Amino acid sequence: MAGINVSEVGIDDISLHFPRLYFAMQDFAKFRGADYGKLSKGLGLEAMAIPDVHEDTATMGANAVSRLIDRNSIEPSSIGRIYLGTESALDGAKPTATYIMDMLEQRYSPKFGEKCFRNCDVVDMTFACIGAVDAMHNTLDWAARGGEERNRIGIVVFADNAKYDLGSSGEYTQGAGGGAILISHNPRLLVIPDIWGIATMPVHDFFKPRREIETRTVVENVLELAEESGASITSNLAEKILKLLPRSKKKNAVLFENEKIMIHKDTPIFDGQFSNRCYSESVKQAFIDFRQKAIVEGRYDPDTDEILTNQWSRIIVHLPYAFQGKRMFPDVFRHDRRELPMWVNIVEEIGPEPISSEYPDTPDGIEEFEKANDSYRRLISKTDEFQTFVDERIEKTQRASSLIGNQYTGSIFLALMSAMESDYLENVEIESNRIGLCGYGSGAKAKVFEGIVQPGWREIASRFHLFERLSTRHAINKTVYEALHKGKRKRSVVKPSTEFALVSVGFEGDLEGQRRYKWVE
């Protein structure tokens, strides 16, 4: 194989912050009347991280960055950029990254000066769950372009609250957390070569639309609720109120300003089955693109080299739930082995795969093929060959996800930390190994890239303390869970300590919606 020309930039360190609260999946299953065995053994779910009252996207991100700065003794003025990947932004215009910057300035300006972050570039990047991968891709390019002599240092932040409607089919996949990735030349953890497989397909598998509702409908619903509660509201009075819409001159009468109200919810609209198909297809196409680019770059020779997925000692993918990786990867496994003798044995065991051209080119025909292909993926996943592949390359990535749940943009990096800390704790040597990474964001886009494990990986992984910290969290019951989900609880369940905390929104004297944070010792 031709020599690899790599710009030595990559991940120097990663830090992770997750809420101190969790809702055990066994308790959730009892609460919802769900099958715990299916959630645990079928999807790999054991607990979901739940943000406390004082936590949001910004605090989780800022806490992770602070952890990274402290343990690496980084001088703030040396950080050239802080790029945030999130789909849980706190504002429609003001980047959540600026809230993170505000918190960091509060904490570090006494030591480093008020302008210690003044020349740092910040921005939010949003593409569902792949936003943090996009932010990292961009930051790697920026660091490489500066050259080793300029030694550009950047921090990529991921922070999300994966929240679904109560009682919805996605509720059990909830989770939350934030993280920070230190990008530099000559990284201690992972060098990332500049070969990226990409697949984009505009679909509506998961999205958070700006919803519209007529103002009159809102008021009518309020009046109906008032009547149900026993309030005496005559039809004449109700009609007088409705006739005022939207002409009210009352100060701050937001509801009365327009005929319609725009509503944004943190919870998504989604089609789970369709999204799984989009995920599988996008990652497969991105893998094909990566493979072709690797051939062109001289990284891979299909005539002499071992197949790519066997070269990757660990395969790290976006995990909306812990077992999603092994459920999704049969497509890539199949594509990478079709021409090998071993595939003949698999076909003899489970039968030939469905071919799209053998189905009618109609909506019903396409749906029939997709169902057949879904069934075939499940058959592949049950073969001994695939089970061995999962045990060797994917299993360790699932462990932390099982205990936290979905982190949206951070899920792929949580999986990376889970695998590397597990290898460290089990004294497995992975130096110089290649790791395959597959990011995915609904809408939809996938990116496939790889990392080369560096000699300093043990030192870095030894400081994660991921599983140790997970064991010290505070369990909550269904009453507290619902109160937090609905925003009814006003006081923190666990008092904030040595962390950033949200202290007010639109406090007296501030602008409407203005958020204030502070560091709590």
Image: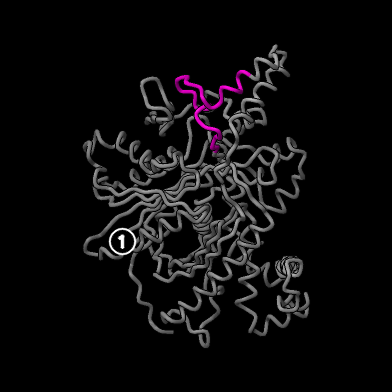
Question: Would residue 244 appear left or right of 1 to someone viewing this image?
Answer: right
Residue 270, relative to residue 188: is it above or below? above
> Badge 1, how many Cα within 10 Å: few under 14, some, many 20+?
many
Residue in the picture at 43% in, 65% down: 453
Residue 458, relative to residue 109: is it above or below? below
Residue 471 makes an appearance in the image: no
Secondary structure type for disc 1:
helix
Question: Would residue 121 appear left or right of 235 to someone viewing this image?
Answer: left
Q: Which quadrant of the rendered structure holds the N terminus?
A: bottom left
* x and y percentages locating residue 256 in the rendered image: 52, 26
**Which is more toward the observer, 478 or 452?**
478
Quadrant for residue 184, please give it.
Answer: bottom left
- Count of labels in the image: 1
**Which is more toward the observer, 204 or 312?**
204
* x and y percentages locating residue 170 in the rendered image: 66, 46
Q: Give the labeled residue for mark 1.
A: 143
Residue in the picture at 55% in, 79% down: 307
Residue in the picture at 54% in, 43% down: 210
**Which is more toward the observer, 387 or 446?**
446
- Magenta highlight range: 240-263
* x and y percentages locating residue 454 in the rendered image: 39, 65
User: What's under tag 1, amino acid-wise?
Assistant: Ala
Give the image's coloring scheme. one colour
Find the residue positioned furthest to the top.
232
Question: Would residue 281 appear left or right of 199 to someone viewing this image?
Answer: right
**Which is more toward the observer, 463 or 123?**
123
Residue 131 part of the magenta-drawn span = no
Q: Which quadrant of the rendered structure holds the C terminus?
A: top left
Residue 275 makes an appearance in the image: yes
* x and y percentages locating residue 155 in the rendered image: 35, 51
